[in-house]
Image: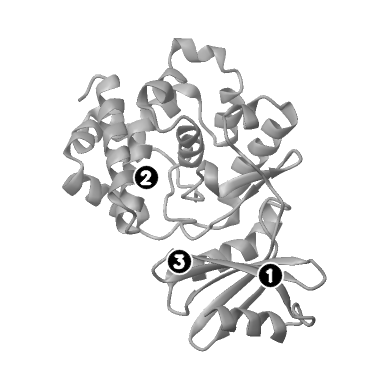
Amino acid sequence: MLNDVFAVLSDIGLLAGGAAAAHANIAWAHHMNVEVEAQDRTRYFVKAGPLADAALAREAWALGAAPGCLPGHTPALLANVTRNGLRFLVMSALDVEPVRTLGDIVDDPQRLEQWCGVFRGLPRMGPPALGAREEMRQFIEGDLPVLARHIGLEENRRRLETLPQAAQHGDLVANNIGHVGARPVVFDWEDFGKIDLPGFDVALLLGSLLNHDPAKIAALCREEGQGAPWLAPLLAAAGLDRAQFAGLLPIYYGAFFWIKCVGGYGAMIQNAARHTIELLVRDQGSG
């Protein structure tokens, strides 16, 4: 596959002088991520996989739609090329500052406002997948009885039924984002639109930066969380207030668990999500 990457870059005129260096890693059994540095020191990032891979096709679509709704917040999609039964997404390689702590986002007012813009722009990129919420609900009923009972309570059922649909990135965790100056950059769009719960991306981003610790996550929404004034603008950008967000936290993590299970992620992340769900439900008095 690596030779095909070089051939694709040459065919589209990006590797005329040859490659100075290349670094490749297998992300999944069927995906390859390759960073190539051309002789002129320009770097390109290529994601490759089977042409029939729906996730890769979804990422191509999302990156194509992003400039109109999230200008500058994604890598530029330079080419979407097929070769030998494979799809190759050629993107600009960016020098990003990684996000390691919550403070990297919320302590800088300019960055915080930029992130609010990201959360406002995400649902405008396109509609969520048809039937996604019902598929998630059926999964929860079969695999997460604690959460199914929680959702079955009248208040929680009404909260979920009246929640509008808004496409989410679906995997907005700390290692899928970075900053170029104050500007957030978001990567890995294979799960875009699989989740349609407003606020899911906010919950997942905050949760990943808090090591998915249910006590810390829940504390943001309780009285002591009033010491986090940055939360209100993030939630407003997602169309929620603090009480709505708090009530939806177990459901967000149920959606996270579902998407990791159907995506074939390992037992470690699945177990962490299940544990967080159980403690969040207990925190809300319905466990």
The crowd level at tag 2 (other Cα within 10 Å; few <14, some 14-19, many 20+) is many
Task: Kindly report the distance in space between the C-alpha atoms of the residues bearing marks 1 and 3.
Answer: 28 Å
Closer to the chain start, of discs 3 and 2, is: 3
Asked if residue 75 is positioned above or below residue 214 in the image, the reply reads below
Residue 283 figure quarter: top left
Q: Is residue 54 left or right of residue 40?
A: left
Q: Residue at x 69, y 67 (%)?
A: 44
Mark 1 sits on what residue?
21
Residue 147 figure quarter: top left
The mark lying in front, picked from 1 and 3, is: 1
Residue 132 point in image, percent of width and height: 36, 55
Amino acid of disc 1: Ala
Task: Work out which quarter of the rendered image holds the C terminus and state it.
Answer: top left
Asked if residue 102 is positioned above or below residue 23 in the image, the reply reads above
Label number found at residue 55: 3
Label number found at residue 256: 2
Q: Nearer the viewer, residue 137 or 155?
A: 137
Residue 232 point in image, percent of width and height: 57, 23
